[in-house]
Amino acid sequence: MPSYHLDHLQHLETEAIHIMREVAGEFERPALLFSGGKDSICLLRLAEKAFRPSDLPTPLLNVDTGHHFPELNEFRDRRAKQLGAKLIVRTVEDAIAKGIAQPAPGEISRNQLQIPVLLAAIEEFRFDCCIGGARRDEEKARAKERFFSFRDSFGQWDPKNQRPEIWNLYNGRLNPGENMRVFPLSNWTEMDVWEYIKREKLEVPSIYFSHRRSAVRRAGQWLPVNDLIPPRPNEEVRELTVRVRTIGDIISTGLVESPAEDVDDIIAEIAAARVTERGSRADDKASEAAMEDRKKAGYF
Amino acid sequence: MFTEDALSAPPVTIPVDILRFNTCGSVDDGKSTLIGRLLYDSKSLMEDQLEALERSADITGGGQINLANLTDGLRAEREQGITIDVAYRYFATPRRKFIIADTPGHVQYTRNMVTGASLSNLSIVLVDARLGVIEQSRRHTALAALLRIPHLVVAINKMDLVGWSEARFHEIRAQFEEFLPRLAIKDVKFIPLSALNGDNVVEPSVHTPWYVGPTLLGHLESVHIASDWNLSGFRFPVQWVNRPHNPKDAALHDFRGFSGQIAGGIVRASQKVVALPAGITTTVKQIWTYDGPVPEAFCPQSVTLVLEHDIDISRGSMLIGLDDNLPGASSDLQAEICWMHPRPLQKGKKYYLKHTAQTVQVVVAEITHRLNLSTFDAEPEPAELAVNDLGQVRLRAAKPLVFDGYATNRLTGSFILIEPGTNATVAAGMLHPPREVVKPENGDYVI
Ligand SMILES: Nc1nc2c(ncn2[C@@H]2O[C@H](COP(=O)(O)OP(=O)(O)O)[C@@H](O)[C@H]2O)c(=O)[nH]1
Ligand SMILES: [Mg+2]
């Protein structure tokens, strides 16, 4: 006698597949934002589950800040190839050269500059929808996000005026120039993502696992030693056994000391963790409303 | 940051089910504080979240931690001390995983409540013990009933401000019991608590020796959630036609599947199904999934069906089973609706209606009645439905919908209305059962 029962991962999976197919059904030119990070790795598997045996109906899009971990880009390119998916990369470097993005004087971080690059790519390819791997449990402003998140013709999010989202009926209607961001993993937690990676036996970039790396102590965190902001003489540098828990740019991604060698280790580590994954991202710590401000301006 | 023994911790057991719930009540009843308290006392908060909470307390709270800041994620919310939009929170105990929607109670309360609650297993209606039942309590309870949320908790909050009075608790309970019989709610639990101090939230309170029931978390962990999903009457709204057009692979060259999420019932390979609205009977040749073909699949799984015959099916078509539970097919629709937009609903206006995977045009043929939330009486034929009104309407659709009554199937019995031009989602609708069901024994249905 079959039980007709879905466990929580199967529930989250079918919810996400349904959303992916709604995107394919309602939009003309959708794109899937793929960074090579753990959340977008899950997105890709869900896209396979939603659309195979057909080809994926969306190209993959990545905004390359030029400050990515090399391991991440290598993985991104390889995975796209394995899937036979079209990968579009637009770089901040290039956008600066073309005058699309203007760095603030003295600002090294490329975080803010991803926004104009993404918006320019949306315009270039006339994408009407971008599927992203953001999760509500990551951050307080994200916790207010809908599955179908409407953006006006400037790419802006208006949190006070979101479309109600009821049952599984998503309103994808747009006027010209407007855009939708769709987040199929909205209801997933960090733990769900790793349990799914385990269940689906998904490969992830090597930096998620424990490795030796020189790290510099900066603003209460260990950051990878890098050429962009080299250690100053008064800063402590150490050779540590670390991994990354969430991947941002190389200058802002905190390293966690960890012996975790495989996905089981990571799951055990998260179960016992006392800080959130975003606790290791300097870009979110900038202020209480750092994420909210970036999202309003058109961030993922 | 991570301790060594994290790695020697026992293997994590995956909790078996998810309870979705939402909090509702009027402004300042303590919804955000209650959620903060649930997270805080169940040790679901992480150190950096606590640090951020303490930082903001130093700046804005005169040193007092404000638990509401945990869900009030927007700057304007923290500045004004109110919740602006639905916030979602996630936590797990060894017994269950929880998805919480904090649904604010001010101007847009119907919009927010419907957004936060449409898929809830349980709603918590907060009441300020000093104020007792107010208009908002009645509205929220009526909405929970209309949405057919199976379980209701009436959380009588701020008991610390009424001296933990048992008499007051029973007085408020009696106020509810006066109107509850008029609403379709099966299971109601009353819990006296103080969200601010944590009494009866996670830990039992020393102040309420007269209360013998569970704490709020105890109740959330143990309430029986009967399957939300309807397993009788196969319904498969087609979302996407899966055609690989693969010129190289012979097996894929002719593959034609229909992808969707099962919205009701069970489907088995080689069973007969009817494609509506075409009305053609065919057989399921294969239930295709990424992980391989399966002999059967059930609601709410997402699958791709390959059929025996090449028939005209596209997004918005519905495949159904041939058992006793047949849907209706009609362009004349009777429904309860929650109106969510400042521009009122009026007779004769046209909207887009999204139902399952299709969008059709409808015109408002009649506003049958409006629900008076003070008396729960139906006021016949109002001129319009204004923002936050609940009422009953008759709609005429440009083409027939294949549907069930909302009470039978949430997924095939619900719709939203979209205003042309602005594309605003203006209403949530719950269909009445069809007056007539489709008749597949009719010869027309067989090829
Ligand atoms: N005394 C007392 N105050 C409370 C209690 N729960 C909440 N409050 C206070 O009531 C106010 C409104 O709370 P909040 O959670 O923002 O209400 P919401 O608008 O329903 O989200 C805040 O000042 C809280 O500290 C309680 O149980 N007792
Ligand atoms: Mg609130």
Image (spheres, coloured by chain):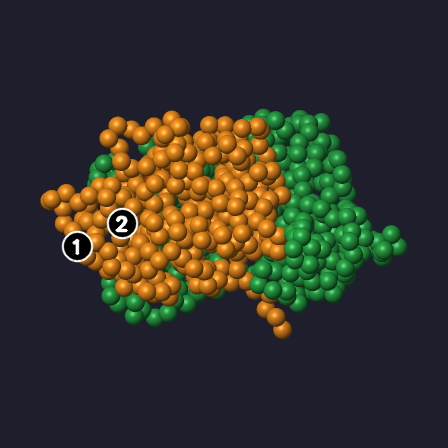
Chain colours: A orange, B green
Q: Where does the image place residue B240, in percent across and percent down from the top left?
A: 65, 48
Q: Is residue A285 left or right of residue B403?
A: left
User: Relative to residue A192, is residue A107 depicted above or below?
Assistant: above
Task: Determine whether the residue tagged by mark 1 lies in a helix, strand or loop.
Answer: strand
Kind of residue at disc 1? Arg
Q: Which residue is mark 1?
A: A238
Give whichever of A153, B91 is nearer the camera.
Answer: A153
Residue B273 in view of the camera:
yes
Locate residue B83: give its quadrant: top left
Q: For mark 1, name the chain.
A: A
Q: Residue furthest right?
A: B443
Q: Is residue B1 left or right of residue B415?
A: left
For the point 65% across and 45% down, the residue is B357
Q: Which residue is mark 2?
A: A254
Q: Where does the image place residue B276, in percent across and percent down from the top left?
A: 76, 49
For the point 21% across and 52% down, the residue is A215
For the point 43% across and 50% down, the residue is A76
Label 2 lies in ligand 2 vicinity (Cβ under 8 Å): no
Lower position in the chain sequence, tag 2 or tag 1:
1
Kind of residue at disc 2? Gly
Q: Where does the image place residue A179, in percent across and percent down from the top left?
A: 52, 34
Give whichever of B167, B186 is nearer the camera.
Answer: B186
Task: Determine whether the residue tagged by mark 2 lies in a helix, strand or loop.
Answer: loop
